[in-house]
Image (cartoon, grey):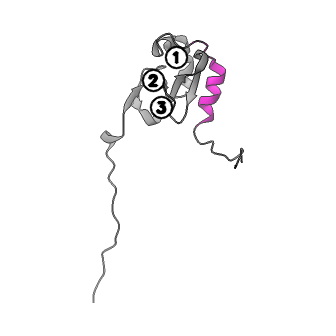
Amino acid sequence: MRLKARSGTRRKEELPANAGPVRSCIGCGGRRVQEELTRLVVGPGGVVVVDRKRQLPGRGAYLCGAGCLAAAVKRKAFARAFRGKAGAVDPSALGQALESGPAQGGAAGGSGC
Ligand SMILES: [Zn+2]
């Protein structure tokens, strides 16, 4: 009797040490992998906006989530993080943007060209 015990499965090994760059949250100061944080940048006019795709140019600041937003505003962490370039920080608008999460991909939009 012959047994074919070989299956072609390969294991992917993921090294946690190689997860990516680590950034500090400006709200709580906790250090996390960049992917777990939300990036914020200063847009035109000094308005702080959420850079969900992390593609906008300029200096970035990072937040764990909406919970750390209030702390960051209290600590005036935006002024520090953006070196005075941040003008108006709108906590409610930023909070909404943070809470909406990255998983909002065209379910309701349906804007196909
Ligand atoms: Zn945080």
* Residue assigned mark 3: 37
* Residue assigned mark 1: 72
> The disc labelled 2 sits on which kind of residue?
Cys
Q: Few, some or many C-alpha atoms within 10 Å of disc 2 (few <14, some 14-19, many ≥20)?
A: many
Q: Earlier in the sequence, mark 3 or mark 2?
A: 2
Q: Residue 25, labelled with which disc? A: 2
Rendered image quadrant of residue 66: top right
Res 69 visible: yes
> The disc labelled 1 sits on which kind of residue?
Ala
Q: Which element is circle 1 on?
A: helix
The tally of labels here is 3
Q: Tags 1 and 2 in contact by the CB under 8 Å rule?
A: yes
Q: Nearer the viewer, residue 57 or 91?
A: 57
Q: Earlier in the sequence, mark 1 or mark 3?
A: 3
Whole-number angstrom distance, CA of label 3 to CA of label 2? 7 Å
Q: Tags 3 and 2 in contact by the CB under 8 Å rule?
A: yes
- The yes-or-no answer for disc 2 within 8 Å of ligand 1 is yes
The residues colored magenta run 87-101
Q: Which element is circle 3 on?
A: loop
Horizontally, is 25 left or right of 89 in the view? Answer: left
Q: Earlier in the sequence, mark 1 or mark 2?
A: 2
Whole-number angstrom distance, CA of label 1 to CA of label 3? 14 Å
Q: Nearer the viewer, residue 93 or 71?
A: 93
Give the image location of residue 97, x and y in percent.
Answer: 62, 29
- The yes-or-no answer for disc 3 within 8 Å of ligand 1 is yes
Give the image location of residue 50, x and y in percent.
Answer: 57, 28
